Amino acid sequence: MSKQVWIKNVNERLNSISQKYGGLFMIVGLVLAIGALCYSVYVANQPVEIPPKELTCTLNSGFPLFLQVTEDDDFQILFKNEEVREPWIYNITIKNTGGQPILDEDFTKPLTIEFEDSTSVIKTSIIESSNQDLWDDFLESCSIHEKNLSIDGMLLNQGESITINVVTEGAAGNIKYDQRIVGLSNLILKNSVKESMDKQEELKYMLLILSGVVIFVSIVILIYVRVKAKKEYLELQKCLSEYTKRLEGLSMEETKNDSECPCK
């Protein structure tokens, strides 16, 4: 089989498939798109079940206070007359995300935040709190011991939160939380920095997938348009051929009639 014959057969098969199933493919695609939209709306409107007690600790950021170390030996960072060689600052939010308040007496054991691999916790400060009472409760119950930050207890009503900055000597390779609160088996731990990086990676993959889908759809459309154009071209050729034959027949008939006319 020659190359031209093979191409002709492929074009004929594509033309046949397009004629038979082209409309079906469009209907199936439309139904799938409508189904996906309806499912998205259904999921978005589902009620969210709020657990009775839930405490969420979110690491919002963590970075060194100084991005570049100076070579000047006279430059020092001091805290209580002691030099801080590698200060890091961590921003953490503690929030009651449950449906019930967490009472001060619910803390049978302090909520402890350990900054592993760091040398020590230098200082903690409140950045934001839901109200002044929560601010005062935190200041009274907060204590620092080596690389641990402990909170003996505080009242957190539903939706209330407090955001703090914690300065450490050295970077924390891991932040470990420990607690013993009545009605609360585990903390909900979030890392906004990691989640942001993960979202960027997910966005890259989604863009790649979307690009692939767009390319695939473009190829299908091009094939469909090419097959349709080929079909119209063949139909046009057929019409022109029939029209030409008809003109030739009329011309021959006129010539015949002219030859049969008697001469005067």
Image (spheres, grey):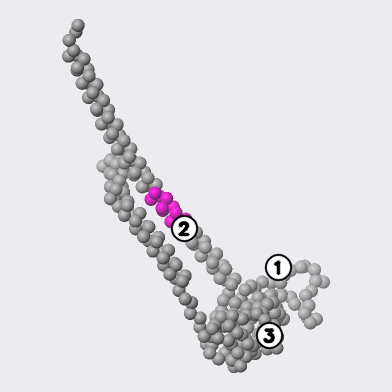
Mark 1 lies on residue? 67
Q: Nearer the viewer, residue 61 or 254?
A: 254
Q: Nearer the viewer, mark 1 or mark 3?
A: 3
| Residue 3: x %, y % from top left | 30, 41
Mark 2 lies on residue? 210
Mark 3 lies on residue? 133
Q: Which residues are magenta?
A: 208-221
| Residue 232: x %, y % from top left | 33, 40
Q: Nearer the viewer, residue 16 or 103?
A: 103
| CA gap, disc 3 and disc 2 | 50 Å
Location of residue 112 by image quarter: bottom right
The residue at 70%/85% (across/down) is 136
In which quadrant of the rendered image does the N terminus lie?
top left
Location of residue 229 by image quarter: top left
Most common SS among magenta residues: helix
Q: Is residue 102 above or below residue 257?
A: below
